[in-house]
Image: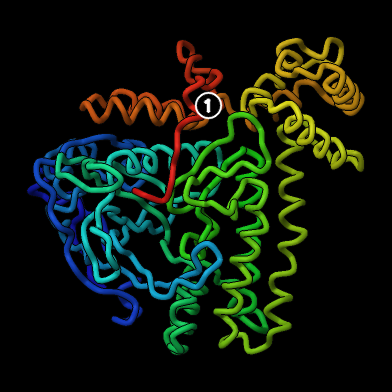
């Protein structure tokens, strides 16, 4: 295990040290390939998350420096870091894709923080042995989207990888058209995916599979070690975290777009922000990924797709669990944990502190009402904060073209609110119904400006999304209805 000074004296002039290591590198060379990032010419800052830098213990002066810019673009190696690209496999759109891996990402290592060790990874840092036919690069538009959405999800209280910064370069990158390159520095306690386990299971490397599972248990799920079957306990623990993650997604109207097993975190984190979208008009069958022609990852299918992915993880762990029935039993709690967690989140959005038998019907009716009227999802919930049983609150009613159906629902909701402490209700709704989410058109406007070297839109969105429940006077336009052109935005797996 190596340690060095992340904030090197020649970079900051202070000499303050941070421990730097790479525990993943100790798993063995079957798990990765060591290599350096490929440099990009004339990098520039696109966005910096100074709050995240403070959480990591990075010195403010150094984080503003040219040395930091070069380091997080991949042009200079941070002292003591041990860059590597990991290998994994996975199912993509329901089909076994074989070996995949970090085709454009490099894990630099991890540092200690008050909340525990955090890995730092550069995404878009150049070709690796796992790039297949790719160029190993990320483009400006997708990098801005990941940078902003990572922090938007964190602000919403939904488990996620985090984003430290994004840098850009005018180096050309070919996608559907010529774009420019960018690199996202992202952080997480771990970037291990379901696909890491699938890789070693499907290739018959069961010793490595056990090494990886033991690492995950000892590092992240130590209670599983005391279970009669630790690897079944690991599967059950991952299933539980995934169930709560799906509840968070569904409650806030988030569509991931590409829920392949290689995009599922072993820690129950949202990972790999590609063709994501927050719902505008509520459509349960909405497909945000233009590449998903079969609608496999539609909004209303995400919970079942998560279970399907967990089933794949269970299959991968079978050589260690050795009992198919025990593996299936480890998945079973998901079927109750997810709906219970979703109901709890929806009660919070409705301002209901306690659980009553009729709440499930109320929640179901709310979803049906929103869908039949194609109501803007985020605006409905935010306006509902001001709903009163006496008037039904006209700003909410005005969202519906079918007033009779709304009136019937409002009566049901009003009856449920009888006896509810209104102060408690208001507090619950205030922290469960965000004013700001990263709508596609907001991201698109920031991206268009960034292409002209105007990054003020990125900075503004970052500030709003990190505190999405606050009012932010003067920024109401960021919480309004999407413009007509927003529906024409197409997002796909290309980035």
Judge the density around disc 1: few (<14), some (14-19), many (≥20) Cα neighbours within 10 Å: many
* Place of residue 324 in the rendered image (x, y in percent of width and height, measured from the top left): 69, 84
Q: Nearer the viewer, residue 396 or 491?
A: 491
Q: Residue furthest left?
A: 10
Residue at 66% x, 40% y: name it.
Answer: 251
Is residue 457 shown left or right of residue 233? left
Q: Of helix, strand and loop, which one carries label 1?
A: loop
- Is residue 7 shown above or below 425? below
Give the residue at mark 1.
436
**In this view of the protein, can residue 394 be seen by the observer?**
yes
* Colouring chosen for the image of the structure: rainbow
In this rendering, position of residue 386 left or right of residue 230: right
Q: Residue 121 in the image: x percent, y percent?
A: 31, 56
Q: In which quarter of the image is residue 422?
A: top right
Q: Residue 489 location in percent, x, y?
A: 45, 33
Q: Residue at x 69, y 73 (%)?
A: 330
Rendered residue at 43%/46% (across/down): 492
């Amino acid at each position: 295990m190596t340690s060095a000074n992340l904030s090197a004296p020649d970079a900051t002039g202070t000499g303050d040290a941070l421990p730097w290591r790479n525990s993943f590198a100790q798993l063995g060379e079957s798990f990765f390939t060591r290599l350096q990032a490929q440099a990009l010419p004339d990098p520039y800052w696109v966005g910096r998350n100074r709050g995240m830098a403070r959480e990591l213990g990075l010195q403010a002066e150094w984080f503003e420096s040219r040395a930091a810019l070069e380091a997080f673009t991949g042009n200079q190696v941070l002292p003591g870091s041990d860059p590597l690209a990991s290998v994994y496999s996975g199912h993509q759109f329901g089909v076994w894709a074989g070996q995949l891996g970090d085709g454009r990402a490099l894990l630099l290592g991890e540092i200690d923080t008050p909340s525990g060790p955090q890995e730092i990874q550069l995404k878009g840092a150049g070709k690796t042995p796992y790039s297949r036919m790719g160029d190993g690069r990320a483009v400006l538009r997708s990098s801005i989207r990941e940078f902003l959405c990572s922090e938007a999800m964190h602000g919403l209280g939904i488990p996620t990888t985090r984003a430290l910064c994004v840098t850009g370069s005018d180096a050309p990158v070919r996608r559907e058209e010529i774009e420019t390159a960018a690199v996202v520095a992202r952080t997480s306690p771990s970037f291990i995916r379901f696909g890491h386990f699938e890789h070693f299971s499907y290739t018959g490397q069961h010793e490595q599979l056990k090494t990886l599972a033991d690492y995950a248990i000892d590092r992240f799920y130590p209670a599983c070690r005391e279970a009669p079957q630790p690897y079944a306990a690991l599967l059950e623990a991952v299933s539980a975290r995934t169930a709560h993650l799906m509840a968070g997604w569904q409650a806030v109207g988030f569509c991931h777009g590409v829920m392949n097993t290689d995009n599922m975190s072993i820690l129950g984190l949202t990972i790999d922000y590609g063709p994501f979208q927050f719902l505008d008009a509520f459509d349960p069958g909405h497909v945000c990924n233009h590449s998903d022609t079969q609608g496999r990852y539609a909004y209303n299918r995400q919970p079942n797709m998560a279970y399907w992915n967990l089933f794949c993880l269970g299959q991968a762990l079978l050589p260690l669990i050795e009992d198919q029935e025990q593996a299936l039993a480890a998945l079973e709690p998901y079927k109750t944990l997810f709906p219970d967690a979703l109901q709890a989140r929806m009660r919070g959005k409705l301002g209901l502190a306690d659980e009553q038998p009729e709440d499930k019907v109320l929640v179901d009716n709310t979803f049906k009402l929103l869908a039949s009227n194609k109501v803007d999802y985020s605006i409905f919930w935010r306006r509902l904060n001001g709903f009163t049983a006496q008037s039904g609150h006209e700003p909410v009613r005005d969202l519906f073209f079918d007033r009779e159906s709304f009136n019937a629902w409002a009566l049901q909701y009003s009856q449920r609110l009888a006896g509810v402490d209104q102060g408690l209700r208001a507090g619950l709704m205030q922290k469960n119904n965000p004013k700001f989410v990263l709508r596609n058109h907001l991201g698109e406007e920031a991206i268009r400006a960034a292409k002209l070297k105007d990054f003020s839109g990125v900075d503004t969105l970052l500030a709003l999304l990190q505190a999405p429940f606050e009012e932010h006077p003067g920024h109401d336009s960021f919480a309004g209805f999407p413009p007509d052109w927003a529906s024409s935005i197409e997002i796909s797996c290309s980035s």
